[in-house]
Image (tube, rainbow, N blue to C red):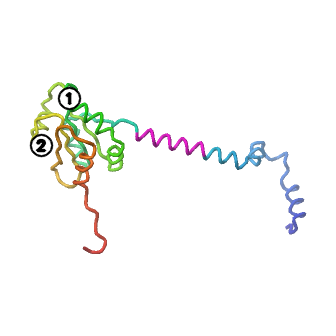
C-alpha cells in the first residue's frame, strides 16, 4: 500500500487507467461548484414558484350533494359548505374575495378542509334541505364543520370577510392536550 504522496499518485495512475473510465465519469470530475450552485438556485426558484402557484390557485370547490357531504362527515374530516347563487351579488363578492384570501386558503389547506359549493342558481331540494337543517334561508351562507368536535357547524351568512371565516374555523379547533397533567 502506498504511503507517500508520490507513491499514491503513481498507484492511482496505475490503478485507474483513464482509457477504461467511462467518458461521463471523466466529464463529471470537471463538474464545478459553480455548476452545482446554479442547479441549486434553479431548483429553489422552481420550488418557490410552485409554492406561490399553490397560494394563488383558486379554491377547488366540490359540488354539494347530500350523499357526498354525509360521506365526508362520516370520515370526521373538516368541511366548509358555501351556499350561493350566480344571480346573488353578495354570493359572488364572498366567493371571489373572502375565499380568495391567501391566509384563509392557507389555513384551509393546512387543516385539510374540503370546500363544498351548494349552488342555488336553480333551486335544488338538496341545497334547500341543507339550509333548512342549519336554520337559514338566505344566500350567501357559510357552514364550517371542523370535524370531530360536533355535528353542529358555525354558521355565517351575508357578506362575510375572510377573517370571519378564519375565526369560525378557530372557534371549532380541537383543543391541544395539556402536557402538564392538567
Mark in front: 1 vs 2:
1
Q: Is residue 101 above or below residue 1?
A: above
Residue range of the region highlighted in magenta in the rendering? 41-55
Expressed as whole percent of the image width and height from the top left, the position of residue 68 reads: 23, 38
- Secondary structure mostly seen in the magenta stretch: helix
Magenta region includes residue 44: yes
* Residue visible at 24% across and 73% down in the picture: 182
Judging by the rendered image, the residue that carries numbered circle 1 is: 85
164 vs 108, nearest the viewer: 164
Q: Quadrant of the N terminus?
A: bottom right
* Residue visible at 51% across and 44% down in the picture: 47
Q: Which mark is residue 134?
A: 2
Expressed as whole percent of the image width and height from the top left, the position of residue 150 reads: 17, 53
Q: Regarding mark 2 in the picture, which secondary structure is present there?
A: loop
Rendered image quadrant of residue 3: bottom right
Q: Which mark is residue 144?
A: none
Q: Regarding mark 1 in the picture, which secondary structure is present there?
A: loop
Q: Is residue 168 above or below residue 60?
A: below
Rendered image quadrant of residue 82: top left
User: Quick check: marks 1 and 2 in contact, CB under 8 Å?
Assistant: no
20 vs 26, nearest the viewer: 26
* Residue visible at 35% across and 49% down in the picture: 110
Between the C-alphas of marks 1 and 2, the distance is: 18 Å
Question: How many residues crowd mark 1 within 10 Å: few (<14), some (14–19), many (20+)?
Answer: some
Expressed as whole percent of the image width and height from the top left, the position of residue 11 reads: 87, 60
Q: Is residue 1 left or right of residue 150?
A: right
Magenta region includes residue 42: yes
Q: Is residue 171 above or below residue 142?
A: below
Spot the residue most to the bottom.
181
Amino acid at each position: 500500500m502506498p504511503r507517500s504522496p508520490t507513491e499514491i499518485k503513481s498507484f492511482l495512475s496505475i490503478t485507474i487507467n483513464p482509457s477504461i473510465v467511462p467518458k461521463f465519469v471523466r466529464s463529471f470530475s470537471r463538474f464545478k461548484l459553480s455548476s452545482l450552485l446554479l442547479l441549486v438556485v434553479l431548483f429553489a426558484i422552481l420550488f418557490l414558484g410552485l409554492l406561490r402557484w399553490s397560494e394563488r390557485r383558486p379554491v377547488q370547490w366540490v359540488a354539494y350533494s347530500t350523499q357526498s357531504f354525509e360521506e365526508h362527515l362520516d370520515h370526521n374530516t373538516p368541511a366548509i359548505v358555501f351556499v350561493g347563487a350566480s344571480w346573488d351579488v353578495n354570493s359572488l363578492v364572498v366567493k371571489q374575495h373572502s375565499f380568495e384570501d391567501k391566509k384563509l386558503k392557507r389555513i384551509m389547506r393546512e387543516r385539510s378542509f374540503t370546500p363544498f359549493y351548494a349552488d342555488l342558481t336553480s333551486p335544488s331540494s338538496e341545497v334547500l334541505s341543507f339550509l333548512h337543517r342549519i336554520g337559514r334561508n338566505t344566500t350567501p351562507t357559510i357552514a364550517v364543520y371542523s370535524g370531530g368536535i360536533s355535528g353542529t357547524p358555525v354558521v355565517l351568512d351575508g357578506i362575510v370577510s375572510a377573517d370571519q371565516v378564519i375565526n369560525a374555523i378557530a372557534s371549532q379547533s380541537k383543543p391541544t392536550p395539556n402536557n402538564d397533567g392538567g
